[in-house]
């Protein structure tokens, strides 16, 4: 199952730089029942993300921080000027699919087509080859070995799609909760999974999206400091809608309306405070500062084998 397994966890090289990332999509790119999931309807829906992307860019500039923006290809094709502003501000661009469809609902062929389409659009705007990827909703298929193989075939060398904890919309707790290497036939991929904290023996995420908005600022400060004492980096991910207190919720259930809007009014101030108190950077900084010699090395079918072992 693993070619190499670390004894404890992968340490970062001091000074600790935390991974700051933003998933760039529209408010309707949600994977909740009742959300507008028909791409043919999207062009008729009012866009909202651009104003909050500008808020994010202003925040980053005021703190002299760079980040990685994982951009949906459909959004980039419609809002080329926004993606250009992100590039011109010195940030890194990663791929977040073309249509924001769940990968675990695709075949290898349809995933490859979606990936190539998005990489072509993003590469033409950024003026360089895109080598980082994050799956929509962290929807890495648990029973297939083709996900990482297709990424590597198309030049992806860094991935941040693994959510190594249980969550209502998926999660892959069988994967390591630390940076690891996936060895494929087309080359190695450096995986930067979403950070977890142990709570009552369970892995829990507090550093991204709705989890970030739900968690008080003092908890984030405490968590980041504890990770730094352990010489570990934290992976944080946010969306433009995490800054939007009036994000549309029509058609969603009460619980999903709560998850979409809770804490949105305080996101900007929380992010600003953390940007001022800790060091942050894009995925390239994390790749450089991680001690990969201690990283677990796994095969592309790691999750498939883990599932089979649990069933045995």
Image (cartoon, helix red, strand yellow):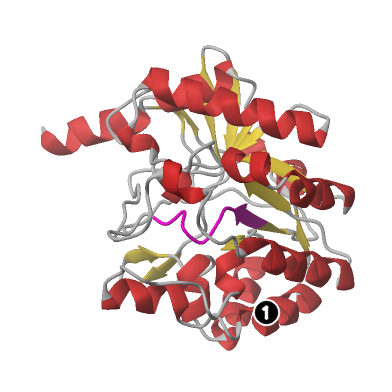
Determine the residue positioned at 53% across, 86% down. 216
265 vs 185: above or below: below
Q: Examine the rendering and report whether any part of residue 62 can be seen.
A: yes
Determine the residue positioned at 28% across, 78% down. 254
Where does the image place residue 264, in percent across and percent down from the top left? Answer: 55, 80
76 vs 259: above or below: above
- Name the residue furthest top: 185
For the C terminus, the image quarter is: top left
Majority secondary structure in the magenta region: loop
Q: Nearer the viewer, residue 240 or 181?
A: 240
Residue range corresponding to the magenta coloring = 21-30
**Is 28 within the magenta?**
yes
Determine the residue positioned at 29% across, 61% down. 34
Where does the image place residue 153, in percent across and percent down from the top left? Answer: 56, 16
- The residue wearing badge 1 is 268
Left or right placement of residue 27 versus residue 188 in this view? left
SS under mark 1:
helix
Where does the image place residue 171, in percent across and percent down from the top left? Answer: 35, 51
- Name the residue furthest left: 312
Q: Examine the rendering and report whether any part of residue 176 can be seen.
A: no
- Name the residue furthest front: 44
27 vs 10: above or below: below
Q: Nearer the viewer, residue 113 or 202?
A: 113
Left or right placement of residue 64 versus residue 285 in this view? right
Q: Nearer the viewer, residue 310 or 271?
A: 271
Q: How many marks?
A: 1
Q: Residues within 10 Å of mark 1 (few under 14, many from 20)?
A: some
Left or right placement of residue 295 versus residue 13 in this view? left
**Is 58 within the magenta?**
no
Left or right placement of residue 149 versus residue 34 in this view? right
Where does the image place residue 127, in percent across and percent down from the top left? Answer: 83, 30
């Amino acid at each position: 199952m693993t070619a190499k397994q670390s004894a404890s966890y992968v340490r970062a090289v001091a000074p600790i730089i935390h991974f700051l990332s933003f998933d760039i999509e529209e408010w309707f790119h949600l994977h909740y029942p009742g959300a507008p999931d028909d791409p043919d309807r999207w062009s008729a829906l009012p866009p909202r993300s651009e104003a909050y992307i500008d808020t994010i860019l202003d925040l980053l500039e005021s703190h002299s921080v760079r980040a990685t923006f994982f951009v949906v290809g459909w959004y980039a094709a419609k809002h080329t000027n926004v993606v250009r502003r992100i590039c011109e501000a010195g940030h890194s661009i990663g791929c977040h699919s073309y249509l924001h469809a769940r990968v675990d609902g695709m075949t290898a062929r349809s995933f490859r087509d979606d990936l190539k389409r998005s990489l072509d659009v993003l590469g033409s705007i950024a003026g360089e080859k895109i080598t980082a990827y994050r799956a929509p909703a962290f929807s890495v298929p648990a029973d297939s070995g083709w996900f990482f193989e297709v990424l590597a075939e198309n030049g992806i060398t860094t991935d941040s799609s693994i959510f190594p904890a249980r969550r209502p919309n998926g999660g892959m707790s069988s994967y390591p909760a630390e940076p690891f290497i996936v060895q494929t036939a087309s080359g190695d991929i450096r995986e930067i999974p979403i950070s977890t904290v142990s709570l009552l023996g369970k892995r829990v995420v507090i550093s991204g999206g709705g989890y970030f908005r739900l968690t008080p600022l003092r908890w984030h400060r405490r968590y980041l400091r504890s990770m730094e004492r352990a010489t570990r980096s934290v992976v944080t991910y946010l969306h433009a809608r995490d800054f939007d207190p009036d994000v549309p919720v029509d058609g969603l259930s009460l619980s999903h309306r709560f998850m979409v809007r809770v804490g949105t009014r305080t996101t900007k101030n929380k992010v600003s405070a953390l940007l001022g108190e800790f060091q942050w950077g894009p995925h390239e900084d994390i790749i450089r500062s991680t001690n990969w010699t201690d990283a677990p090395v796994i095969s592309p079918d790691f999750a498939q084998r883990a599932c089979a072992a649990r069933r045995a």
